[in-house]
Image (cartoon, grey):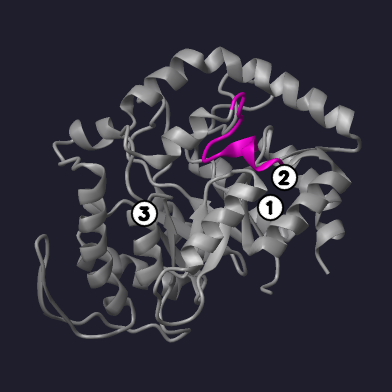
Amino acid sequence: MSALRFGIWALVHGSRGAFQDPDEPLDASWERNRRLVLEAEALGYDSTLIAQHTANPYNDEWDELEAWTAAAALAALTQRIEIIAAIKPPLYHPVVLAKMAQQIEHISGGRFAINLVNAWNKPEYEKAGILFADHDERYVYGREWISVVEPLLRGERVSFDGRYFQVRDYLLRPADPFRARPAIYVGGESLPAQDLVAAHGDVWFINGQPLAEVERLIASARALPRSGPPLRFGLSAFVIARETTAEAEAAYAHLASIAAKDAPIRARQAANTDPAVVMKHTHAAQTPRIGTNGGTAAGLVGSYDEVADRIRAFHAAGIELFMLQYQPFEAEMRRFAKEIFPRVKN
């Protein structure tokens, strides 16, 4: 069994749970994210995920951190932590993106990864005049895209003739001196997403869900045809951990009451989301839910011992990396490192 790893979601649009929380500023600045990731590394976190949006998906008047320039800067500033930058394939030509990823891999000394995601926020594309194809066609595009990116990252000379991309005799140098190529994470839970991660991914990111559903998804992915090393698994989760169960439930209720004020924002976000995205339907059944990408649906709400036990259960089921959210983020990130790390790390 792979060792447990813990990561944090970078605050690319500020808070992850409730937007009107007086204890959590709507601060998506580079300076805050720089401090956050450097502190996470010092606390012993293993990874950070930088989601990619060009405009804030909740309110385009709010600030939004740019993922790839931030990833390059963090690669130069950090020493140990893994840096994962999300990528929506239609926003970057695969040759250009492969070159960028290869460069950040060099800057980081072999600590970089890409997270291939299928877009869900229609206005981000449509307002820029970029085609927002239907769900399954976006995965057709994504498979072609990664079929160009992956061998380029390996330092191979690539020729490719597909529906979307025609690449002839392309080679990128310098090659990766640290490993075969940067790691590839894939998000999404539809059947096309599962096929894509089985064919091209190293790690499948699963949105926060109860243990039984995560076990089902892992079993489904493991049954798919695959060449190369076994697929690994990550889970997104929002954590509310306290000394006692009652204290955790009270903190959850307090945050849920604040999050309820965001109903108009969430409704606008839902209207902008492709209805074919599986995440939209699984999240609709999880109420009240705090956080993005499943959030508290993973069940990491409880006493320190309860949260540690649930993490161990997910790990036994196959989850290697927990990508975590908190609110207020910095304070709860420190609490988790102090109280949960000693309970679950050998």
As measured in the structure, the alpha-carbon distance from the residue carrying label 2 to the one carrying label 1 is 9 Å
Q: Which mark is residue 220?
A: none
40 to the left or right of 135:
right
Amino acid under disc 3: Leu
Instruction: Name the amino acid type tagged 2.
Output: Met
**Residue type beneath disc 1:** Glu
In this rendering, is residue 129 above or below 20? Answer: below
N-terminal of the two: label 3 or label 1? 1
Q: Are marks 3 and 2 in contact (CB under 8 Å)?
A: no
- Report the quarter where the N terminus lies: bottom right
Q: Nearer the viewer, residue 157 or 120?
A: 120
Image location (x, y in percent) of residue 286: 58, 30
Figure quadrant of residue 243: top right
In reply to whether residue 330 is colored magenta, the answer given is no
Tell me residue 192's x, y (percent). Answer: 32, 55
**Viewer-nearest residue: 301 or 81:** 301
Question: CA–CA distance between discs 3 and 1?
Answer: 37 Å
Circle 3 — which element? helix
Could you tell whether 206 is left or right of 105 in the image? Answer: right
Span colored in magenta: 287-299
Residue at 77 percent across and 58 percent down: it is 312
- The numbered dot on residue 191 is 3
Image location of residue 187, percent across then percent down: 43, 53
Q: Which residue is mark 1?
A: 39
Q: Report, in whole angstroms, how far the alpha carbon at label 3 lies from the one at label 2.
A: 34 Å
Q: Residue at x 67, y 38 (%)?
A: 326
Q: Residues within 10 Å of mark 3 (few under 14, many from 20)?
A: few
Indicate which disc, 2 or 1, sits on the residue closer to the N terminus.
Answer: 1
Q: Which mark is residue 333?
A: 2
Q: Are marks 2 and 1 in contact (CB under 8 Å)?
A: yes
Point out the frontmost of discs 3 and 1: 3
Question: Which quadrant: the C terminus?
Answer: bottom right
